[in-house]
Amino acid sequence: MVGEGVLHICLLHPDVESVLVINRRPCQVQHPKLKEIIHDNFYDFSPINNQLTGYNACFFCLGVSSVGMKEDKYRSLTYDITMALATVLAPLNPDMVFNYVSGASTDSTEKGRQMWARVKGKTENDLLALPFRKAYMFRPGLMQPIPGMNHVYRKNKYRVFTILSPLFPVLRGLFPRFVCSLREVGLAMINSVIKGYPKQVLEVTDIVKLAK
């Protein structure tokens, strides 16, 4: 859901010249700015290295729920895939800004009790150590879907977001530190490349501020 929402914002934004999407299956989105690479093995991007140069930003939005998953499997799908791409992109695009969608309550110490938070923390820390021009760790909480986007992410929009959609204004008023919109996440990512931001780990309040 996050990836398709961010893609939608990028395709509509006047300052985004072109977008490359790396997928296992076609995203079924058609747009003059959009180029797509179908690639099966997300643990090895070396076969497509020559197609990954010339970009100044990567918005990494891939993620899975840790519910019912053992740590080694979750680490494989979260840390290993992320680093497989990031370690390829860094030397190919030294002027790149790398944005990673992490999550609220991620554990930067890598020592906490929550497995998913430790893995996300390890991923964030190792991304920040790579030689990108800048790297930003996005920690959104509850995200309001983009109105009218059902035709784009109808397969990836979680049912809970549909159920909660009418309540988002109330939830945001009650919990401003934990609720933002998917539109704000996309705009904040774009602005991180254009304007930059003084913090590299962005909580919800930072995301909302950077989106403006």
Image (tube, rainbow, N blue to C red):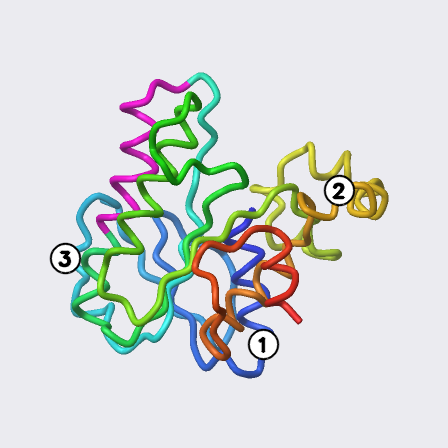
- Residue at image position (43%, 32%) is 117
CA gap between label 1 and label 2 equals 29 Å
- Residue at image position (31%, 56%) is 128
Among numbered discs 1 and 3, the one appearing first in the sequence: 1
- Residue at image position (30%, 31%) is 75
Q: Dot 2 corresponds to which residue?
A: 175
Q: Label 1: state its secondary structure.
A: loop
Tell me where residue 39 appears, x and y as whole percent: 27, 52
Q: Write the start and end of the magenta stretch as one range.
A: 69-84
- 162 relative position to 130: left or right: right
Rendered image quadrant of residue 210? bottom right
Rendered image quadrant of residue 107? top left
Q: Are marks 1 and 2 in contact (CB under 8 Å)?
A: no
CA gap between label 2 and label 3 equals 45 Å
Among numbered discs 2 and 3, the one appearing first in the sequence: 3
Tell me where residue 88 appears, x and y as whole percent: 19, 59
Does 108 lie within the magenta span?
A: no
Q: Dot 1 corresponds to which residue?
A: 13
What is the three-letter code of the residue carrying label 1? His
Q: Label 3: state its secondary structure.
A: helix
Q: How many marks?
A: 3
Q: Dot 3 corresponds to which residue?
A: 47
| Other residues around mark 3 within 10 Å, as few (<14) / some (14–19) / many (≥20) | few
- Residue at image position (46%, 45%) is 102
User: As rendered, which of 62 and 112 lies closer to the eye?
Assistant: 112
What is the three-letter code of the residue carrying label 2? Phe
Q: Main secondary structure of the magenta part?
A: helix
